[in-house]
Image (cartoon, rainbow, N blue to C red):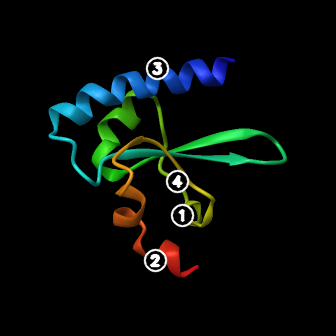
Amino acid sequence: VAAKKAMQRIMDAFIPKYIGAGRPLGMAIFSSTHRESNIVTLYFSPRAVSLAMQFGAIPCESTFVDQELSLLVGDERSIDFLFPEADSK
C-alpha cells in the first residue's frame, strides 16, 4: 500500500513537469518488479532527473536496462526511443 502511494505521488509530480516541458519523447518513468521479492524499482529517464532527485533517487546500474521494464508514465514510445537495443535482445 505504501509503495502504491509513493508511486502515485511520483506520477502526480511528473505529469505537470512533463506537460510543461511539452511532453518530450525522452521524458518518462519506467517500473520493474522483482518477481521473487515483489520489490518495485523505478527508472527515471535522463529528462526526468530533476524529479528523480526530488524523490531521493540514486543513479542505477547499467544492467537495469536488462530488466523487464513497464512504462509507468510518459509517452508509450519512450521505451523504444530510450532503449533501441531492447528489441534485439
Quarter of the figure with the N terminus:
top right
Q: Crowding near pointer 1: few (<14 within 10 Å), some, many (20+)?
A: some
Residue 19 point in image, percent of width and height = 21, 33
Residue 11's image quarter?
top left
Closer to viewer: mark 4 or mark 3: 3
What's the residue at 21%, 48% (across, down)?
24
Q: Is the C-beta separation of discs 2 and 1 under 8 Å? A: yes
Q: CA distance from mark 4 to mark 3?
A: 21 Å
Instruction: Tell me, for residue 60, which label it has, or none.
Output: 4
Q: Which residue in the protein does label 3 denote?
A: 9
Helix or strand or loop: what does disc 1 sit on?
helix
With 50 as the anchor, is 6 left or right in this view?
A: right
Query: Going from the N terminus, do you reach mark 3 or mark 2 first?
Result: 3
Q: Is the C-beta separation of discs 2 and 4 under 8 Å? A: no
What's the residue at 66%, 39% (across, down)?
40
Q: Which residue in the protein does label 2 denote?
A: 85
Helix or strand or loop: what does disc 2 sit on?
helix
**Vertical comparison of 63 with 54: above or below:** below
With 3 as the anchor, is 50 left or right in this view?
A: left
Q: CA distance from mark 3 to mark 2?
A: 31 Å
Helix or strand or loop: what does disc 3 sit on?
helix
